[in-house]
Image (tube, rainbow, N blue to C red):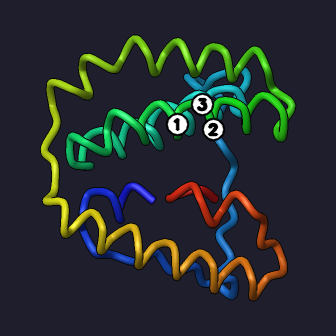
Amino acid sequence: MSLGFFGIGKEIHVFPEVFIIHKPEMIGRAKDNWKQYLVADVVMKSGAFLLRSPIPDVFFWYPTLLLFYTFQAAIVRRKPLSALLAFFKAISLFPVFLKNRNPISNDAALRWLNVRKQYQEDYYKRIGKWTWFRKYIPATH
């Protein structure tokens, strides 16, 4: 998702035929990787939108996306403490994201949202997981 926000225009392809066998190194890793992933997920998804979206969209969509991803982590993924930590982490990083903004134009943002919405609708209908909120909240998965 961040690749789309940053306008890089790259796609990530997964090749399930390629097997990689490795032994994960545990030194230096977090004890709870799932918690670390959820915190990063909530903070960076909403933060990426803040970094690149035009200023009128920031005031509505940043808080909306932040709350959506926080509730998703708390309720759907059943990690309320991790979600709360992620929410406060995102709030604490808000000034940093705001200071480092490099927004795209309104036209480019609308084009990106429309393309993403159409892509997600096609994808989720194809796999049978289309839900009502995907129509109204951009960039959710």
Q: Residues within 10 Å of mark 1 (few under 14, many from 20)?
A: some
Residue linked to disc 1:
64
- Closer to the camera in the image, 114 or 73: 114
Marks 2,3: beta carbons within 8 A: yes
Residue 116 position (above or below residue 80): below
Measured Cα–Cα span from mark 3 to mark 1: 5 Å
Marks 3,1: beta carbons within 8 A: yes
State which quadrant residue 72 falls in: top right
Q: Amino acid at mark 3?
A: Leu
Residue linked to disc 3:
67
Looking at the picture, how far across and down is residue 51, in whole percent?
A: 25, 41
Question: What label sits on residue 34 in the rendered view?
Answer: none
Marks 2,1: beta carbons within 8 A: yes
Measured Cα–Cα span from mark 2 to mark 1: 6 Å
Question: What label sits on residue 68 in the rendered view?
Answer: 2
82 with respect to 77 (left or right): left
Looking at the picture, how far across and down is residue 138, in whole percent?
A: 51, 58
Residue 13 position (above or below residue 50): below
Q: Amino acid at mark 2?
A: Phe
Secondary structure under the numbered disc 2 in the rendered image: helix
Which quarter of the rendering shows the C terminus?
bottom right
Residue 101 position (above or below residue 80): below
Looking at the picture, how far across and down is residue 132, in whole percent?
A: 75, 63
